[in-house]
Amino acid sequence: MRSNRPLTQFAVGKIQEYLDLGPRRFQSGSVGNTSVILNQQGDLDILSVFLFDQPIVELYFVDGRFDCLNVSDGNFYDRAGNPSGTTRERLNGILDCLAEMCLIPEGVRVFLTEGRTQCYVGRGQVRAPFGKGYPDLCINAHPVTLEFTK
């Protein structure tokens, strides 16, 4: 279990289902405010997680191989312009799942600074601002090295 929130568990379960079964046997689905949808475009599969019909994660697979993921704030903000608590919680569950499957490095999180004035995605000193003004980030597929692509 990556989260005590059932909708995060649903999203993580659907991602694991895609990774375990492949695109031919995967079934897109929705529960409550969360949907996981597969879009196939030739050799490209895009597995998207939506929160209130807004994409917050897009996983890109080229010829069946994980290439990168795009994280988005979904345009859900707190008063300081940081991604909402629900968005951060959902993203962190998904990031944990991807790290456990060795698709991205362990410890990548969406986190707030101590004063809650700025949100980041990353781990340690390798991080990028995230939130209003910085709504999207692309993380390259690599089990050890954290790399962002613009």
Image: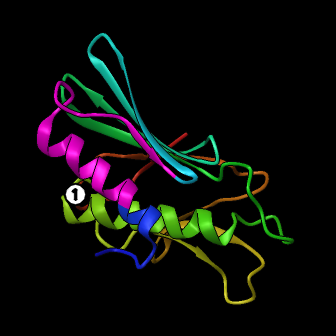
Image quadrant in which you'd find residue 96 = bottom left
Residue type at tag 1? Pro
Residue under the image location 58 percent in, 52 percent down: 33
Which residue carries the number 1 mark?
143
- Residue reaching furthest to the bottom: 114
Residue under the image location 19 percent in, 58 percent down: 102
The percent position of residue 62, horizontal first and vertical second, equals: 26, 25
Classify residue 65 as left or right of residue 78.
left
Image quarter hosting the N terminus? bottom left
Q: Is residue 52 rendered magenta in the image?
A: no
The percent position of residue 77, horizontal first and vertical second, equals: 77, 62
Its colouring scheme is rainbow
Q: Which residues are magenta?
A: 10-31
Residue under the image location 66 percent in, 48 percent down: 74
Q: Is residue 63 above or below residue 71?
A: above
The percent position of residue 58, horizontal first and vertical second, equals: 45, 39
Q: Nearer the viewer, residue 38 or 146?
A: 38
Q: Is residue 23 above or below residue 10?
A: above
